[in-house]
Image (cartoon, coloured by chain):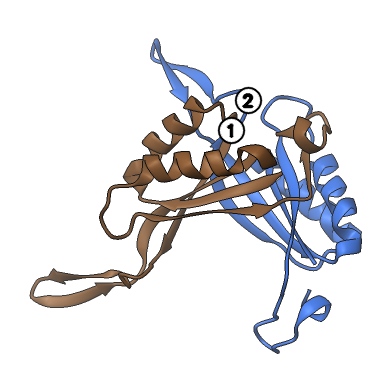
Chain colours: A brown, B blue
Amino acid sequence: MRLVTAVVKPFKLDEVKTALEGIGVQGMTVSEVQGFGRQRGHTEVYRGAEYTVAFVPKVKVEVLVDEADATRVVDAIVAAASTGAIGDGKVWSTPVDEVVRVRTGERGADAL
Amino acid sequence: MRLVTGIVKPFKLDDVKIALESFGVHGMTVSEVQGFGRQRGHTEVYRGAEYTVAFVPKVKVEVLVDDADALDIVEVIAKAAQTGSIGDGKVWSMPVDEVVRVRTGERGVEAL
């Protein structure tokens, strides 16, 4: 099993959710995060003074998936979250050893 | 080392914390997240109109543990967080390469 994590632009969350549901993903976890990438935040001018917004608000999406689906899920998130502008975010996948569904105690792929 | 992550119902956080402490876990990270699983959120009726609550509030608990303890800790969290009703959440464990305690620079198991 794998955990696919994506950090994307907040207004793209709905499209990511729709895309994931479209490929049969059954659940996800979403959190509000802040960060920066290559653009190193951006500068904003407010009342004549220049401020650097170092940490740009983003949304983190986490999905537990079967090994075989990981690439497909990564591709689906990338396609849905892409705007072509800087700050679109990143998507990655990490290995997971053991998953338990809390309600039933099911383990492994059954718990996804 | 392993990172054990649990997504659980917010009101179960205290039970999970107590269970982990009595198991001998010395620390944890908690964040507020939102998500859905098989139940696909739930519908609520407000003033006669039906709304779908797509993302249900959850709590994410993260614990860094020794390899030997990982499965036990997954079990401890799953047991403590269980209510038997839908939306109880998931618990999983992932391999971690390197851990550093920021204050001292200790590495590996000593940093846990």
What residue do we see at 80% from left, 38% from top? Answer: A108
> Where does label 1 land, which residue?
A27
Do the residues marked 2 and 1 share a common chain?
no
**Which chain contains the residue that carries disc 2?**
B
Which label number is shown at residue A72?
none
Spot the residue most to the bottom: B104
Dot 2 surroundings within 10 Å: few (below 14), some, or many (20 or more)? few
What residue do we see at 82% from left, 32% from top? Answer: A106
- Image x and y of residue B90, in percent: 71, 40
Q: Are marks 2 and 1 in contact (CB under 8 Å)?
A: yes
Of A36 and B89, the residue lying toward us: A36
In the rendered view, tell whether residue A97 sits above or below residue A28: below
State the quadrant of the C terminus of chain A.
Answer: top right
**Mark 1, secondary structure of its residue:** loop
Q: Amino acid at mark 1?
A: Gly
Which label number is shown at residue B38?
2
Is residue A39 left or right of B70 when viewed as pictured?
A: left
Is residue B1 left or right of B32 when viewed as pictured?
A: right
Spot the residue most to the top: B48
- Would you identify the image quadrant in which residue A46 lies? bottom left
- Image x and y of residue B23, in percent: 90, 58
Instruction: Please say whether residue A48 is visible from this viewpoint.
Output: yes
Of A94 and B47, the residue lying toward us: A94
What residue do we see at 42% from left, 38% from top? Answer: A16
Q: Amino acid at mark 2?
A: Arg
Is residue B18 left or right of B55 when viewed as pictured?
A: right
Spot the residue most to the left: A48
Dot 1 surroundings within 10 Å: few (below 14), some, or many (20 or more)? many
